[in-house]
Amino acid sequence: MAGAKQEIFQLASDSISEKYIRQIIGDNKFDKNKDLIKNKVMSNSSKYILYMKGGQAERTASGIRMNVTMKLALKSLRQLLLNQGLLYEIEGPPKVLTLMSIENRVDGSSFSWWVDDVDAESASLRYLLFDFQKSLRTQLTPKGFYAINSGKESARNSLPSTLRNVDAPTEDLLMIGDFLKAQIVVLGRVQIKKSAKRPDLFEIHVRGAALYTSNGRVVGEVIRVFETNAGNFNQVVRAKAKEVFPSVAKDLTVQLYEAWKSGTFGSSLLRLTFSGELSFGQVNLLKEQLLSSVGELKSLKERKFTPRGVVFEVDSGSSAKKLVEKLKSSRFEGFQISVKDWSSDQLQLAVSFQ
């Protein structure tokens, strides 16, 4: 009998886990990732099933029957799914493309790997920039990211000529990332300048930002200034770059990894305004069911709560239009939601409790 009870508990755990995981990520993604979900999520059910309690076991003609009661922490389940990248639309590791320029303000040379016309004087800058890319790749790979190798000539040659500009605007750089199928692009500059202290000292200024390609949202940023030792320009600059680039790359990678874990990759920041007389308990119920029933919501933060309504700030994996469609088709227990108005960054909603 004890063995039968344990089997019933396991079946109940698997059944309820599958039900809610399918609700959160959809049937297609569940079916494509069954083995991963079984081995990495459902095998850790103790992290989101807070307790299970069995009733009286009864023998029936078909075997042993027992009612099982359990309580789930949906937030913990979502976190496990996030850890495996299952809340994202992208398949496989997120791809990162570096689109950093490097400028030598001492002699006026510069280098950008995607630009057609490259000065002969920029050879040393090319090596410096690829040192930075190598440092970033070294940090990204263990975290599950894939750094696209832009050092190859084929990467530049595959781009349309209209995108190979020195002063390309951010929109064009995002298009380069999208063209090369990168979910994240790292934009910015490395600038080398003379120090104001002494003529044989130099400064390396690094300013970079990681943006999500589809919507331009910033998910990481670094700003650093380093001073070289005194000496020959090429030698001291290269030595300092090799020393400091790994720490800069690590800082940016940590930010990207935290953004990935929190579910903000590929999401849009939207404002949801619910009108209606809501109690504190009703607001909590609203939050809980929005997160569990609307899979596109990656996080939800309460920004304003008044007797006439509540305002949430959410990270949504869908556009405002798709979120409106999802809300209209979703069914909630104990209340109804209607869409009054919406724009690209906010939704006006009404909620009525039954």
Image (spheres, rainbow, N blue to C red):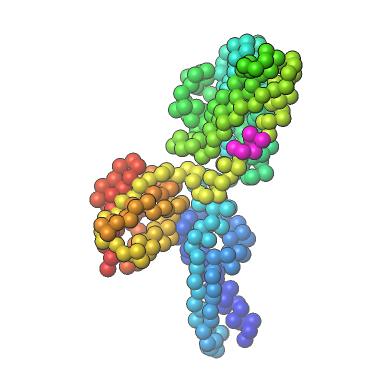
Task: Specify the quadrant that holds the C terminus.
Answer: bottom left
> Looking at the image, which is closer to me, 13 or 131?
131
Residue 270 screen position, x and y as percent: 38, 45
Q: Quadrant of residue 224?
A: top right
Residue 239 screen position, x and y as percent: 74, 24
Task: Specify the quadrant that holds the N terminus.
Answer: bottom right
Residue appearing at x 56%, y 18% in the figure: 115
> Looking at the image, which is closer to me, 53 or 35?
53
In the shown orientation, is residue 4 left or right of residue 74?
right
Q: Which residues are magenta?
A: 247-252
> Looking at the image, which is closer to me, 282 or 147?
282
Let me know if residue 14 is in the magenta part.
Answer: no
Residue 32 in view of the camera = no
Residue 132 in view of the camera = yes
In this rendering, the answer to whether 188 lies above or below 87 is above
Q: Quadrant of residue 330?
A: bottom left
Q: Quadrant of residue 332?
A: bottom left
Residue 154 screen position, x and y as percent: 62, 24
Residue appearing at x 48%, y 55% in the figure: 25
Residue 53 screen position, x and y as percent: 53, 79
Residue appearing at x 69%, y 26% in the figure: 241
Residue appearing at x 50%, y 35% in the figure: 211
In the shown orientation, is residue 338 left or right of residue 142?
left
Let me know if residue 248 is in the magenta part.
Answer: yes
